[in-house]
Image (cartoon, rainbow, N blue to C red):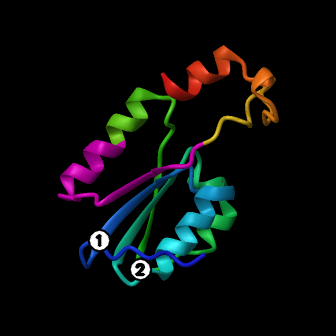
Amino acid sequence: MTLSLHSFPEASIALVQGASRGLGLGLVDALLECPRIERVIASCRDPQAAAALQSRACSRLQIEPLDVTDGGSIGALAARLAARDVRLNLVVNAAGLLHRPGLAPEKKIEDLEPEALQQVFA
């Protein structure tokens, strides 16, 4: 995937939530190839278990723990970034919930469950 981020300033910083696999990991790869992106902050619940993400280690990739369902985890990442005076130019939320018991990909609108949507959008 080739990204064209002409409207972004040089030396932009991107945060990808849910970067351990799937779309999030693919976006990390694409952002690392983009010359306008100086740094990619890739977050996931358990960075130590994210072998595919860890295999992309380079000077432009910063891997951070983040559980988007936990306010304390969100606050901790925000505090770490603020302490380093990080200013984000792009935030991508690719975190998914299909790893939880009872959740599966929906193929039809009738398959959507309000409780699952509440977890995603609340």
Q: Residue at x 68, y 64 (%)?
A: 51
For the residue labelled by badge 1, is the local secondary structure a helix, a strand or a loop?
Answer: loop
Q: Mark number for residue 108?
A: none
> In this orientation, which residue lies closer to the viewer: 111 or 54?
111
The nearer-to-camera label among 1 and 2 is 1
- Position of residue 31 relative to residue 44, above or below, is below
Numbered range of the magenta stretch? 77-95
Q: Residue at x 29, y 71 (%)?
A: 7
The count of marks equals: 2
Q: Mark number for residue 59?
A: 2
| Residue 95 placement, left or right of 10 | right
Q: Residue at x 46, y 52 (%)?
A: 92
> In this orientation, which residue lies closer to the viewer: 38 or 83?
38
Mark 1 surroundings within 10 Å by alpha-carbon count, few (fewer than 14), some (14 through 19), many (20 or more): few
**Residue 20 in view, yes or no:** no
**Residue 72 in view, yes or no:** yes
Q: Mark number for residue 7?
A: 1
Three-letter residue code for mark 2: Ser
Dot placed on the residue nearer the N-terminal end, 1 or 2: 1
Quarter of the picture containing the N terminus is: bottom right
Percent position (x, y) of residue 41?
Answer: 41, 61
**Residue 113 location, quadrant:** top right
Three-letter residue code for mark 1: Ser
**Residue 101 location, quadrant:** top right
